[in-house]
Amino acid sequence: MTSDMGLLDELSAEQLGWLGDLDRTRADVFARLDEFYVPEQCWPAPTFTEKVTAALGSDLSDAQWRAVGVWAQLRMSMPRDHRPGSALLALRVSERRPAWTGDEIELLWRAAVEPILHGYAHEAPLLIPWAVTRKLTHEEQRRHLPTMRRIQEIMTAHPWHSGSRLKRDMDVFLAGHAENPVTAATCLVGGGDGFAALLVTEYGSRLGDPRTFPLLRHWMTATSARPKPAWLGQAADLLTPDATALIREILGRVPAYRESTVQQRYGDHVRTTTTYLHERTATLLRGMVWNCELIGEPWTVPLLGEVALAAGTGIGGSGPNSRCEMLVNAALLVLGRNGGLEVVAPLARMQAKVRRKSILAKVAQVLDTVAVHAGLSREQLLDRTAPTFGLGLDGVREERAGEHVIRLALNEAGTPLLTFLNPAGRPVKSVPKAVRESHGALLSEFRNTLKEIRGTLPTERFRVERALAEDRVWRWGQVEEFFLDHPVTGVHGRRLIWQILQGPAGTPVRAGDGWELTDPLGRRIQPRADTPMQLWHPIRETVEEVRAWRDHLLEIGSRQPFKQAFREVYLLTPAEERSGTLSNRFAEHRLRYGQAKALLSERGWTGLSLGHWDAAGGSEQGEAVKDILGWQARWDMHLPWESWETDGGGTAAFCVSGPIRFYRTDEESSQEEFRRPAPLTEVPSLVLSEVMRDADLAVGVSSVGLDPEGQGDYWQSYNFGDLTETAEIRRDALARLLPRLRIADRAELTDRFLRVRGDLRTYRIHLGSGNILMEPNDAYLCIVPRGGSDSVFLPFEEEGGMLSVIISKAFLLADDTAITDPSITRQIKV
C-alpha cells in the first residue's frame, strides 16, 4: 500500500522554490521514500526508519544521504500527517555528517520555521541544520543568521522551547554573531521573566562588553548543583573589577524583585501562571553567586543573605514554598563555605522568614557547622552573633557629617529612628542639604542600616519567642549580655519576665552597671552570674501569680513584644483524656486554606499540601507537622467534598481541620514509638499548650466563620458561641483595660460579649469573632474593620489583631449618633 500523494505534491509553491531544479538523485530518493511513507504504517518510528534505510541500502552516496535529509526535513514541516519516523530519519542523516551545500543548509533552516512555530515537532527539525551550521566557518555561518534569529525569537516566546539545552546553545552561538554588546547580552539573558528584562534594559551594554561577555557566558554554564574547582578556576581568570561591581549591583536588585503574573496561550486556551525567575535567569544568577566565593569583600555575606531570603520565601513573601530554590541553595552553599560568624545573622533571618523544610534543613546544617567550629550549640551561636549594627548600649549610633550629626536610635518601644542634628544640636525635620550633597555615602550607609534593623527586629522577636516555647535555659550572665545589654535584642528582652529556674521571677531593671529583677510587689531579685535562668511561662504558674503579673504590666504600662503574661494556656481536657491519642479540640473547622497554610508556616509547621491534582493518590488529604522539644504534632486536614466543583479543579480555596496527634521524636524513642501516636496524657504540658495555641490562632485567623456575610450553623456557632482560650485571654485583657477607657461607663463584659450602650441601640460584640448583635432583637450588624484603635494601650504587641478590632468597634458604637457611613446607619436604624 502506498500513499496517493508524494512529498512534492504536498509542498507549497514557496517550499518548491527552495528545492529549485530537482536533479535525478534527489527525485529518485524522494520517490522511493514516498513509497514507504504510509502514515498508518509509520509507527513505531524505529521500525519505519530501519525499513527505509534497509531498502535504500547501506552504500548510499553522500548526495543520496543529503536527499534523505531534505525529504525528512520537509516532511517534518507538514502539519497534517507528521510522524516521528521523519524525525528519527533526520537523526540518522545527522549522524552520517554528509557534506551539505550552502543552499541545502539554508533550505533546512527555512523548513524548520513552521514546525517550530506551530509545534508540529519539538526540536527535531533543528537537528540537521544546527549540527551542520556549528561546523561552518564564521563567515559561512553569516548567511544563515537571519533564519536562525527568527527561530530564536519563536523559541523564546514559547515556554516549552525557551528552557531547552538546544535553545541555550543557539543563543550562545548567535551571541557570538551579535552586532553590539546589548544584542549579545540579550541573546544570552533572554526574556523569560521580569528580571531578565531588567538585566537587558539596564545592564545589557555592560554585560555584553567584550571585557565582561566571556564571564557572562561562563555564568550561563552554572547548571550543576555546585561549582567544580575547574569552574571556579575559570571564573577567577575571567573576573575583573568591573565584573565584580556588576555582580554587586545585579545581585543587589534581587531582594526588591517580585514575581509577576504571566498569561500563556496554548491554542485556544489561556493559562495564567505566576513567574519569579525563569530557569535561565536563575542559572545566570547562580553563576554570579558562585563568583562571590572568589571575591571575599565584606559586602558579599550580607548581600547573599538578602538574596537567599528573598528567593527562599514563598510567593507573596510567605508560605511553605520558595520563590527559587536553585538560587537559595547557591547562596547557602557560598555562605556555608565562608564559615565565619558573620554568616549567622543572615541565616537567623532566614530561620524566621523561610518556611520550606528543605531550605531550613540546609540553613540548620550551615549553622551547625559554624557552631561546631566555634565550640557552641546552634542556639548559643545565635545568641552570640545577633547583630548590633554599631549601636551602643543605649541603642544609639552617631556620626558627624560636617557641621551636622546623623543619629540612628532604637527606642525602648522597638522603633528605629533616623534623625539629623544641626550645629546647635537640635533635630531638623529633613535631611540637611549639606549632608545630602557632601556626605552621601555616609547617609546611604545609615539608611541601609536602618533598613537592616527593621528587618532584624522581627527576626529577633521570633527567636526569643521560640526560646520561650522551647523552654531554653541560660546563665544570668548570658541573659544580661545577650538579651538585656544587647542594643537590638534587648528591645525585646528588657520587656519580658525572667525567672530563676524553679524560683522567683521578675522584669529587668537597671542596677548600676548590671541588672536586677523586680516582681509585682516591687521586691528586688539579684541572681548570681551563674544562676540558671529561663523565660517565665504561665503554664508553670498558679492562677494568682498569672493574674498578678497581668495587673502589674498594665499598671506600669509595659507592652511586651509578644504574649507572655497574657499567653494562652491549653490544659488537657476530660474529653481529650478519654479520647486517648487524638485531640478534636480544633477539628471540623472550615478554614481558608491559603491563609491557614501561611499562618501555620510562619509558626514553624510544614508539610501541608492539599489540592485537586491527584485525588486518587490522596492530594485532597494531608497534615501539617511541627517538631517541638522531642515531639512531633500532626494536624490532619482535608478538602471538603464539594471543593472540586466550587474550586473548578483549580487551587483549593477551603479546607476542613481534623484531629491533632502527637508522636515522640527524641533520640531515646524507638521507631515504633515514632510511628504510633502517643497518649495525650503523656505529652508534656508545654508542648501540648504551644501546639494548641498555634491551632487556635490558625482557626481564629482563617475560619470562614469570620466572613461578615456568612451564614449557616457553623457560621452562627463560631461567631456567637463559646469562647476559645485565645478569646478568653482577650476577655481577660479587656477586663483590665476597660476601666481605663473613656467609654468605660458605656461598656460592660459578659461571658462571651463586650456589651456597648450607644444612644441609638445597645450592641454586643462577640469576644471570639468580633461580630456584633444589636439588642433587643439580636439583629446582626455587619461592620468591616478599617484598623485598630492606636490610642489604646495594649499589654502585648498584636499587630492589628482582634483585640484592637473589638476596641475600635466599641469606640465607634458608643458614639453611634456620630456614625455617617450609610452601610452602617441603615442597619442600626432599621
Image (cartoon, rainbow, N blue to C red):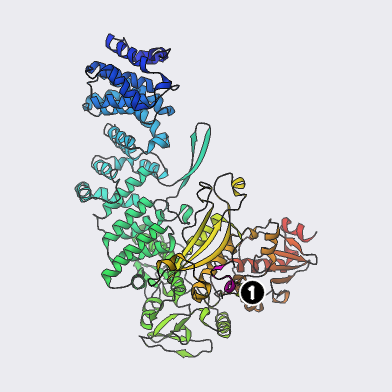
Tell me where residue 302 appears, x and y as whole percent: 33, 60
Q: Label 1, secondary structure: give it.
A: helix
Q: Residue at x 27, y 11 (%)?
A: 25
Q: Residue at x 44, y 23 (%)?
A: 79
In the foreground, 542 or 63:
63
* The image quarter in which residue 533 lies: bottom left
**What quarter of the picture does the C terminus occupy?**
bottom right
Tell me where residue 194 appears, x and y as whole percent: 42, 44
In this rendering, the answer to whether 109 lies above or below 455 is: above
In this rendering, the answer to whether 416 lies above or below 145 is: below
Identify the amino acid type marked 1: Arg
In this rendering, the answer to whether 418 lies above or below 573 is: above
* The image quarter in which residue 385 lies: bottom left
Tell me where residue 200 appears, x and y as whole percent: 36, 41
Q: Residue at x 33, y 51 (%)?
A: 249
Tell me where residue 41 appears, x and y as whole percent: 40, 21
**What quarter of the picture does the N terminus occupy?**
top left
Q: Does the segment drawn in magenta span residue 578?
A: yes
Magenta residues span: 576-586
The residue under label 1 is: 731
**Is residue 793 visible from the viewing direction of this image?**
no
